[in-house]
Image (cartoon, helix red, strand yellow):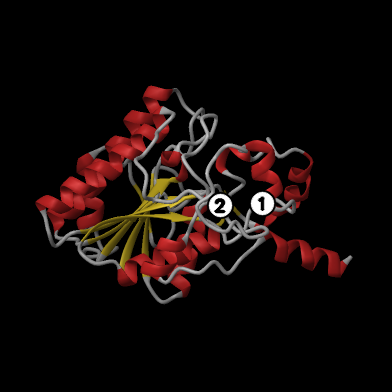
Amino acid sequence: MRIAVTGSTGKLGTVVARELRAAGHEVIGLDVEGARAPGFVKVDLTDYGQVIDALGAVGDRHEGVDAVVHLAAVPAPGIRPDAATFHNNITASFNVFWAASRLGIRRIVAASSETVLGLPFDTPPPYIPVDEEYPARPESTYSLGKHLEETMAVELVRWNPELSITALRFSNVMNPEDYAAFPDFDADAMQRRWNLWGYIDARDGAQAIERALAVAGPGFERYIIAAADTVMSRPNAELVAEVYPDVPLVADLGVNDTLLSIEKARRELGYEPRHSWRDAESSLTEEG
């Protein structure tokens, strides 16, 4: 497919563009920042005219795309003022979704966020492991925007039954160079309790996107996308007993299994994480 990837110069977007190209797809990167290069178009996604032009055709770059992967956003709370984060993210998402629909692009995969689950879990989650079944609990304007983007997608596919929008609720995105810090997390269970000790390797994030592009049907679905394990060496039972002793447990926690349930993504998308910080640590230990 020819796939437009917004946010293609970001942490996740860079890996997604690389992995999709390696899988044989043609990728058109769209971002507000980035150097001039083949397969890249500089676009302000908050300007609808630029968005519909970039998705429809850009000179001799392409004559339209088959799918859109929408990753562009202010990526977390606290980077910009709350109102600026909300205005940027919700406007960019509306422009991308609306332009794609107007142009007849029927397949969209968008980055949602684990934050809609209630992060940071200062108020404990309703149960552990968490999943997609309980209502969104946004606790910041960033998360509120992500929740509203999902809600917008629900209505857009109702208006256009041929449209497919898949929201991937990514956990905290990590690259291999980030893993050196992980062993230090064990000293304080509270340090990473804000997202139930979760993370996602960017390469597995790209895998989830490719699976959604391949198998998602018309309509809207949301999926938690996380690694298969936690960031901790300490066992889950110990962590939960210390930090969330009164939260109901609704499934076997495993020793270090993710507490952000990825069972729906496994079952419906065929997603299966291939990368773990433990593999990187083992490799360093063997080399040492």
At numbered mark 2, what does the secondary structure look like: helix, strand or loop? loop
- The image shows residue 48, relative to residue 8, as above or below, that is above
Taking the spot 75% from the left edge, 52% from the top edge, the residue there is: 180
Sequence-earlier tag: 1 or 2? 1
Q: Which mark is residue 6?
A: none
Q: Amino acid at mark 1?
A: Asn
Comparing 207 with 127, the one in front is 127
Q: How far apart are labels 1 and 2 at the CA level?
A: 8 Å
Q: Position of residue 265 (x, y in %)?
A: 41, 63
Q: Which mark is residue 236?
A: 1
Comparing 245 with 67, the one in front is 245
**Residue 106 in which image quadrant:** bottom left
Comparing 190 with 105, the one in front is 190
- 46 displayed left or right of 249: left
Q: Amino acid at mark 2?
A: Leu
Q: Position of residue 120 (x, y in %)?
A: 53, 34
Q: Which mark is residue 259?
A: 2
Q: Is disc 1 in contact with disc 2, using a CB cutoff of under 8 Å?
A: yes
Q: Position of residue 13 (x, y in %)?
A: 46, 54
- 26 displayed left or right of 237: left
